[in-house]
Image: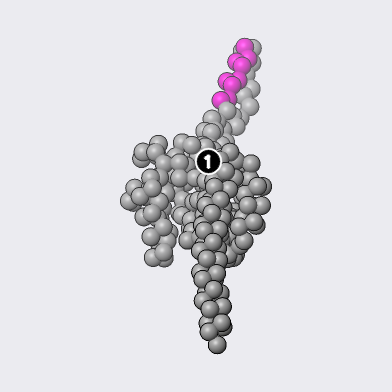
């Protein structure tokens, strides 16, 4: 079983589709998973990878722990979890007790030393990997956007995938104050340039309207004199 490589992006997508279909794919732990390398577990959930790198939740025995894709690999077909069974200890055999011997004028023969029965050491099962502390999920990121388009400044707010405030129009002076809080070279200059262009266009439009108004007032004065 080759458990050296982690899950690829396509394998993670296949696991996501299998979970959506109600299946729980089996995976094998790689060497980066520690002492449980080579063991087999079942994927029961995929959390948000943007919140934590360990977003693959695997059921291993009675534990349900999150792992990163590098800790796992797709288990080959027909592979089941390996369990090491302890070997039974042999029962010690009782040695027969010899009857006492009575002899006359014969040297005493030392009794033969009885060999102690050998007990085979049982193979210990692999140590269980320490339970990882599940990292609490923090709040989703907040994004506030100041935008300029078609002569209007708008502000929008979004937290994660949820829109908190749809784009609404703000005054140019308010937009300039917001940009003043951002100490980024070039940003405030770009906003001031846009406001300067809008100011020049507004002044040209006002001058044009004043000229048209003056013509209308002169025409109105001529009509009043003709009465």
The quadrant in which the N terminus is found is top left
Counting every numbered tag in the picture gives 1
Residue drawn at x 66%, y 52% is: 177
91 relative to 63, above or below: above
Nearer to me, 203 or 109: 203
Q: In the rendered view, would you say 121 is above or below 192?
A: above
Front residue of this view, candidates 2 and 208: 208
Q: Is residue 211 left or right of residue 103?
A: left
Q: How is the image coloured?
A: one colour
Against 151, is 181 above or below?
Answer: above
Point out residue 19 in the picture as x, y percentages from the top left corner. Answer: 42, 61
- State the image quarter where residue 166 is shown: bottom right
Residue 42 percent across, percent down from the top left: 45, 54
Left or right of 20 on screen, residue 137? right
Horizontal relation, residue 148 to residue 174: left or right: left
* View extreme (front): residue: 226
Q: Residue extending furthest bottom?
A: 227
Q: Residue at x 59, y 21 (%)?
A: 113
Q: Is residue 133 magenta?
A: no
Point out the stretch of residues depicted in magenta: 107-115
Q: Residue at x 62, y 12 (%)?
A: 107
Asked if residue 79 can be seen in this view, the reply is no
Task: Label 1, secondary structure: give it.
Answer: loop
Residue 227 percent coordinates (x, y): 55, 87
Tell me which residue sits at (41%, 41%) in the image: 6
Q: Is residue 100 visible?
A: yes
| Main secondary structure type of the part rendered in magenta | loop
Residue at the far left: name it: 77
Check disc 1: other Cα within 10 Å, few if <14, some if 14-19, many if 20+: few
- Residue in the foreground of this view, choosing between 7 and 141: 141
Instruction: Identify residue for label 1.
Output: 125
């Amino acid at each position: 079983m080759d458990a050296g490589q982690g899950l690829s992006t396509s394998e993670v997508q296949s696991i996501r589709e299998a979970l959506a279909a109600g299946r729980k794919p089996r995976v094998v732990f790689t060497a980066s998973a520690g002492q449980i390398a080579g063991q087999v577990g079942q994927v029961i959930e995929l959390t948000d990878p943007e919140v934590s790198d360990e977003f693959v939740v695997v059921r291993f025995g009675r534990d349900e722990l999150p792992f990163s894709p590098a800790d796992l690999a797709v288990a080959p077909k027909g592979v089941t979890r390996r369990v090491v069974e302890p070997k039974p200890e042999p029962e010690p055999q009782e040695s027969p007790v010899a009857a006492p011997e009575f002899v006359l004028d014969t040297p005493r023969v030392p009794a033969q030393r009885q060999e102690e029965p050998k007990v085979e050491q049982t193979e210990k099962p692999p140590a269980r990997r320490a339970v990882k502390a599940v990292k609490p999920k923090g709040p989703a990121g907040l994004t506030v956007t100041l935008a300029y388009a078609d002569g209007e400044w708008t502000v929008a707010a979004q937290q994660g995938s949820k829109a908190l405030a749809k784009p609404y129009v703000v005054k140019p002076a308010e937009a300039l104050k917001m940009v003043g809080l951002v100490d980024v070279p070039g940003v405030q200059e770009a906003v001031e340039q846009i406001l300067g262009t809008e100011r020049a266009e507004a002044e040209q439009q006002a001058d044009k309207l004043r000229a048209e108004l003056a013509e209308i007032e002169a025409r109105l004065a001529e009509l009043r004199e003709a009465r």
